[in-house]
Image (tube, rainbow, N blue to C red):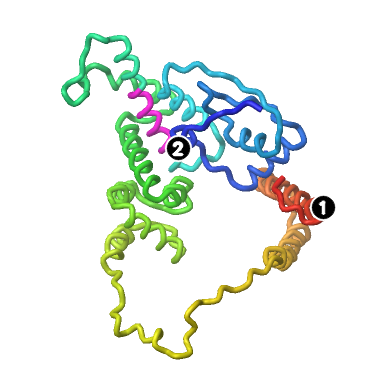
Amino acid sequence: MIKLLTDPDITILKYPSDVSRAVLLEADMSHNGCTKPILTWKGIIIDGHKRHEICSRLGLPFTVTQKDFYSKNEAILYACEQEFEQENLPAAFQKYLLGKMVQASIALAWDKFIATNPQVQPDANGNYSICCINRSVILSDIIAKYGKKKSSLYAYRDYAEQMDVIRKKEPKLARIILTEHIQISLENVTEISRLPADEVRNIYSMIESENITKITHSHVIYGKMRKRSIVAPPAAKRTEEKHPYSPKIKEMPIQDPDAELKSLTFTIPSWMGSIQRARERTNLSATTEDARRKLDHQLAALSFLAEQLRKQITAGGNNQNG
């Protein structure tokens, strides 16, 4: 099997697939194989990361198409454009991709300028004069293709830079912002990107523990203050260690190997009840095509996973995915 590489600067441009879409893709590939080639540049995957992961895991053969880019920045620009064509991308991720396009377009222009103008030398800090490239011309293609103003594109560029900073400090927070599982203003994104990593993690922990759906400025302040408010309790108050009958070592509970199966067995009847109610109470001819399509998508994914689990049960509990 061909060995391919991944680059984090490319993989962050891929919108996280929902479970049902990933399951359906795996179901299709299990029956029909990998019919679409993996797009690469210098052995690095540019498009087809999920298909490659499935092929590697299931041992499926795949084909590779090599692209010829001027530099990595052109590869990033291409990957952004391809991902932007995906259906149902949330606005937050669209802004992120547009911002990355602006970054890559300007960086690509510098790549070409430096390569074709060796006589031009940078200053003592390694920087070139900004007048060496015309940013308005560079961004004209993005403006024409996506119908955005230049001022908006610069705002999206800043947004993308800030989201990359947040991702380095707390990847889970960046993910829920870009997938719009939580609402947040551009101003608060800027504020959070300026916080130290531990304060960013404080904000994410608060979101998780309190089921917050919108980050406000007060949450940003909370992230700053929480670290300061955490102090160790005085030694005199820790009287529980002096109790003569307190156990010295906490005994961990024995893990039940059937726990997940029991939970699933308990949950499935409620799913069946919901499905049966939908069958009995819904006039499908009166529903929209979009609603029927989305439900069919989820049912197909559920059916495939149920089939895979039944095969594992029949095989005697072989706990392997796929």
Q: Position of residue 312 (x, y in %)?
A: 78, 52
Q: Position of residue 251 (x, y in %)?
A: 55, 76
User: Which element carries disc 1, helix, strand or loop?
Assistant: loop
- Find the magenta span and give its range: 96-107
User: In the picture, which quadrant includes the C terminus?
Assistant: top right
Answer whether labels 2 and 1 touch (C-beta < 8 Å): no
User: Which element carries disc 2, helix, strand or loop?
Assistant: helix
The residue depicted at 29 percent of the width and 22 percent of the height is 135
Which callout, 2 or 1, points at the residue further toward the start of the chain? 2
In this orientation, which residue lies closer to the viewer: 43 or 139?
A: 43
Q: Is residue 71 magenta?
A: no
Q: Is residue 97 above or below residue 105?
A: below
Please give left or right for residue 317 compared with residue 8 in the image: right
> Circle 1 sits on which residue?
315
> Circle 2 sits on which residue?
94
Please give left or right for residue 283 compared with residue 137 in the image: right
Tell me the kind of residue under disc 2: Gln
Q: Is residue 98 magenta?
A: yes
Q: Main secondary structure of the magenta part?
A: helix
